[in-house]
Image: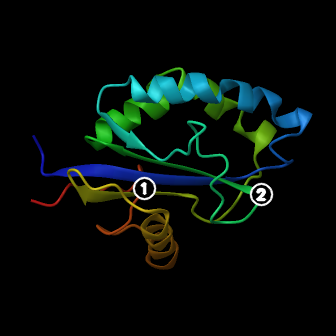
Amino acid sequence: MSAYHLAQLNIAWMKTPLESPEMADFVANLERINALAEGSPGYVWRLQDEAGDATAIRPFGDEVLVNMSVWHDLQSLSDYVYKSAHTEMLKRRREWFERVEQAHQVLWWVPAGHRPSVVEAAERLAHLREYGATAQAFTFRHAFAAPA
């Protein structure tokens, strides 16, 4: 077992408020998609509030949703994101969220057992935006191996 796990943060700017009719299908799928993540091989933890999701956690602004989780490794996260029913949601993301040019997702290694804070995640995203992919903050496309 690795001494490190993979943390990820992704943020998305909603086109309309979460309570709007345009977001209803996204909201209706949250519980199913979160359960899918939790049941996926390699899943460790995800950010959530008392309601079981993270939609009320808005450190990047009222219009920005946050998703943060920890996985055993890059392959586990990649399989969930790109090879599970989660892809249904990815295909529809432009219905609900604005297209952004800046980095909105970041990956980084954390010691096994560590649960990253939103502040830590924001710092990693800022690092990625400023310096590009490094061992401190990277992307699926430009991934780095876990520390030795």
Residue at image position (25%, 49%) is 5
Residue for badge 2: 63
- State left or right for residue 71 relative to residue 69: left
Residue at image position (51%, 74%) is 126
**10 Å crowding of disc 2: few (<14), some (14-19), many (20+):** some
**Element assignment for label 1:** loop
Of residue 11 and residue 46, the one placed in the foreground of this image is 46
View extreme (right): residue: 21
Disc 1 marks a residue whose amino acid type is Thr
Give the image location of residue 27, x and y in percent: 73, 32
Q: Quadrant of the C terminus?
A: bottom left
- State left or right for residue 105 relative to residue 98: left
Identify the colour scheme used: rainbow
* 3 over 30 or under it: above or below: below
Residue at image position (78%, 26%) is 25
Give the image location of residue 82, x and y in percent: 48, 31
Q: Which mark is residue 139?
A: 1
- State left or right for residue 48 relative to residue 90: left
- State left or right for residue 85 relative to residue 90: left
Give the image location of residue 42, x and y in percent: 29, 32
Give the image location of residue 69, x and y in percent: 42, 46
Q: Label 1 vs label 2: CA separation?
A: 23 Å
1 or 2: tag closer to the N-terminus: 2
**Element assignment for label 2:** loop
User: How many marks are shown on the rendered structure?
Assistant: 2
**10 Å crowding of disc 1: few (<14), some (14-19), many (20+):** some
Q: Which mark is residue 66?
A: none
Asked which quadrant contains residue 21, the reply is: top right
